[in-house]
Amino acid sequence: MSVWLLCALLFSPIGRAEQDGQPVSIKEVELYAEETFCERPDCGTWVLNIIWRDEFAENDKSEKVSYDIEVIRTEQMRTVHFETIHVMANKTGYYHWKWTSSIPLQCTSHSVRLRRRDQDHIGEWTQLYTYKGKDLNATTTGVYPNGKTVMVGSNITFCCIVERDQVPLPKFPIQISNRTYISDPVHFDEPLTKFPIQKYTVVVGKAPLYLLAIPPDDQNLVCVTRDLSSVECNWNVGRNTHLTHNRKTNYTLNGRNCEPGNCTQHALMKQKTKWTLIAKNPLGVKTLIDEADPTERVWLRAPSKISHIANARNVTLRWSWDEKNYTLFLMICQVKLNGNIYTKTFNGVGLSSAVLVNLQPFANYTAQVTCGSLEHFYKWGDWSEITKFSTKEDIPEAVDVWIQYSEQKASVMWKPLTQEQSHGTITGYEITIENAEGGSTKSNIGLNNNKQLCYNITFGSEKNVTVSAKNSVGLSPPSTIIIQSNPDNEVSVSRINSSDGGFEISWEESHSSTCGYVVEWFPTYNKTQCSVKWKKIPECERDACYTRIQSGNFEAGVRYTISVYACTDNRPKLLKRSEGYAVELKPGKVQNLTGENTEGNLELSWKEVPLDQQKGFISCYKVKTQHSDSKNIMTETKVLVPKVNLKLDPGSYTFYVSALTSGGEGDHETLGWTIEKPIQPMIAATLVGCSAATLVFIIITVLCYRKRKWLKNLLYPDIPEPKLAGKWITKGIYCTQMAEGYVKCEIQEVLNVDHPAVSESLHRFDLISSNSKVVPAQNFYQSISESPADVSYCPIEKLTTIIDNPSYSITMPEPVGVTQMSDLTLEMQDAYLPAPNFVQNNFVVKDSEGYKPQVSMSYTSIALVDSPQCPAM
C-alpha cells in the first residue's frame, strides 16, 4: 500500500505539470439564448450562444485552433453535451459557438466550461458559466415550449416546472432539477396549426403550446417576357407551410416584395439579367435564382379579333395584336384546325394572316392561332379564341359502282356519297348506257332512302354503264362498269371460317389487275335484288393480297358468298369464291326421320336441314337412343351422313336426331320404333345348318367311296392265310361218278393233314366247299380230252400248292385217272357233268353202282387261273 502511495506522490506533479503546462487563456466568456419567433412571450428557446476570447490567439501562428466544450445541467451537474471543436485561428481572439438543446433552455439552468487544446498540451478548464433557467424563481406551474412554431417531423420534449412541494404530472416522469420534470420525446409528422398540448400535459390559457409547420419549399423560378418590355417571374410555391398572418412566408425578387407564385418587374431587352427570389418564414429561408436575356424568353400573348374568308377548298384567317411591340417582332405562327395542328406553319414580322388550303368542300371547321419567336423560339404563346367557318360547295367525287347478275337481269349498284365525298347537297344521279353498236341512253334517278342505289338493266349483249352524282355545282367524274353478256362464274367454291364476327380474306396477286381488286359478298340463300355489298382494294401491300370485312356487315346465322374479282381494263375477272358464316348459330331440325329393319339392324335415315335453316356448317348429326323402360339415354352416336345403322335387342325405343354446328346443337327430331324378335334368322339358321350337314355327309361319302380300299384295309383288313408246316391244297376239284353217266365235281378247300387236330376237324365236317356242279360224264370227258387246255370256267382262285391228306381214308372205287391241269379254271355251281373217261388218281370217281374202293386218296389240287370273263354254259 505504501508503494502505491509513494508512486502516486512521485508521478502526480509530473502529470499536473503536463496538464497545467498552459495557463487558462480563455477570457470574457458570455452566454445568451438565441431569440425565436413566438406568438406569445417566453414561448421557449433552444439555442445557446457562447462567445469567448483567447489571449493566446494573437501570438498563435497555427491555422486551426481546437477547444473542448462541455455543457452541464447545473443542479445535477450532469453532462449533456461534450464536443471538441476546430475553428480557424483568428488574430482578434474572439470565437463564437452555438449549441441547440433538446429541451427549452427555460426548463433548467445550463452551465458551460471550455479549455484550449493543441497537439502537445491540453489547457485548464475555465470556470463554469451558467445560463439560468426559469425553475429558479418560478411562482406558478408552467410548461415549455409554449406557443412555439416547430418543423413538421420534429421530436419535441416537453418540460414542466412545478411549484415548490408540488407533485409532477404523470406525463413527465424524468426529473432534471429540483422543480423541473421532462417528458419522453413526442414525434409529430402532420402539419397542424393548432394542436392542444392537453393530450400530453395541461393547457396554459387558451393559446396552443406549440405550432407545427414547415419552412419554405418553393421551386422552379422562371422569368419570361410577354410584352417585350418587362418580365414576369413565376415559380412553384410548393407545400403549404401552415403559417398565417405575420408568420407566413415573405417573398422578395431582387429586393422588391412579391406575391406568392409570380412577380413582374421592368427589364431591359437584349441584356442578360439575373433574378434572385428569397422566400422566408420563421422556420427557414429558400433562395431561387434565374438568369437569361429576356429576348430569349419571349412568350407571346394570344392574337385577337380573328376572322376568316372561306372558299370551297381554302380559307384565309386574319387576326390583330394588342401589344404594340409585336408589330416589329419576327414571329412564327401555327393553326389548330378542327382540334388538330395544321401541317404548315407561317412566319413573318408582325404576322397577322394565314391561308389554309386543301380543305374539304361544304364542310364545317374551327380554327385557332398561336405564335412564338422565330429567332429565339422559347415556347408557343397563348391560343386565340376559336373561330368557326364553312367551306363552299364543289362537284362531288366519283361514286363507287358495282354490278350484280341475276337470271336475265343485271343491276348496276353504287354507294351513296358521304358528306365528305358529296362536296355539297346531292340532288340526283345520271346514268348513261352505251351499247356495243354505239347507241346510248341517259336516265336521271332521284334520291331515295336506300343505303345502296340500284338500277336494273336487261342484258343480252355487252354494255358500258356510266354513273355520275350531281349537286348544285355540277356532275361528279363518271364511274364506268362493263356489263358482260356471259358473266364469269367458273370457279370452285371453298369454305371460309369467320374471325371475330367478320372474315379475313386473302388471295393470290393477279397480273391482269390494273385497278386493284373488288371483294363482293351477299347472302347465299336469300339473295335479293341489290343485296350485294362490296369493298374495293386499291392494290396489294408488300406482295400480300389481304383484307378484312368487319362484323357490322353480317347477320348471325346467315351464310354469305364472298367473291374476289380482279379489276381490269375490260371487265372484272373472278379470282376466288368462298362461303361462310360470320357467326354460326344452332341449326334447325332435321326432316323426315324414318327407320327400316335391314338384316337384323335398324337403319335410321333423315333428310338434311334445309340450307337456309342450317345457320352454320353442319359438323355432324347426333343420334340418341332411349329404351321405353328407361328415361336415360342408352347410347349417343355422332355420324357425318344422314344415315346410321343401329344394332339393338328386341324392344321399344325412342330415337332423337339433331344436327350440330359450332354454334350449338339444333332441336331434335323424334321417332318411336319397336323391334320384334325376327323369325327369318331362325329359319335361315336351320336351313344353313341342315345344308351344312348334308354337304359334310356328301363330302364324307365321296371321300369314302374314293378311298374305299384304303378304308377296308384300315377298318376290315383281310385275314391272312395260315402259314403251317406241310403241304396244303387251298382249292381243288373233286369229281364223283354218279349214276346214269353223270359226274359231280366239287371245288374243295383242304387243310393240312399233317396236323391231327385239323384232320379231325375235317373229318367231322367232311368237305369245306359249297360250289359243285353235275354234268354228263361223257361230255365232261370229251371236253377235257378234246381241248384240255382250252376249258375255261369262271375263275375262282389260283391254286398254288398241292397238299396230301393221308388221314382222309375212304373206301371208294378205283379212281379214274384224270390228267392234271395246271392252269384249269372251273366255276361249278352244283351242276352235274358226265364223268370223263380219263380221271387221274387225284380225283375220286364214283360209278353209278356206287362202287367205292377202299383206298387212301390224296387230293391233287388243280391250279386255277383267273379268267377275264365268264362265258355262258
Image (cartoon, rainbow, N blue to C red):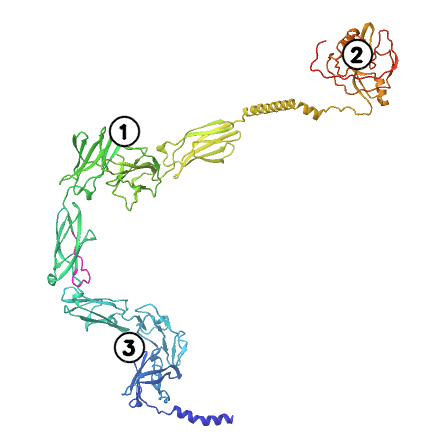
Q: 54 or 649: which is nearer to us?
A: 649
Discs 3, 1 touching: Cβ within 8 Å:
no
Q: Nearer the viewer, mark 1 or mark 2?
A: 2
- Number of numbered discs: 3
Q: The residue under label 2 is which amino acid type? A: Cys
Q: The residue under label 3 is which amino acid type? A: Thr
- CA gap, disc 1 to disc 2? 118 Å
Q: Is residue 384 magenta?
A: yes
On the rendered structure, is 372 left or right of 865? left
Looking at the rendered image, the quarter that the C terminus falls into is: top right
Instruction: Choose the circle earlier in sequence order: 3 or 1.
Output: 3
Q: Which residue is mark 1?
A: 407
Q: 495 or 752: which is nearer to us?
A: 752
Question: Taking 587 as reference, is 116 above or below it?
Answer: below
Tell me where residue 800 appears, x and y as whole percent. 77, 20
Q: Nearer the viewer, mark 2 or mark 3?
A: 2
Q: Which residue is mark 2?
A: 745
Location of residue 332 by image quarter: bottom left
Disc sitting over residue 36 in the figure: 3
- CA gap, disc 3 to disc 1? 105 Å
Q: 397 or 679: which is nearer to us?
A: 397
Q: Secondary structure at mark 3?
A: loop
Q: Nearer the viewer, mark 3 or mark 1?
A: 1
Q: Which residues are magenta?
A: 372-387
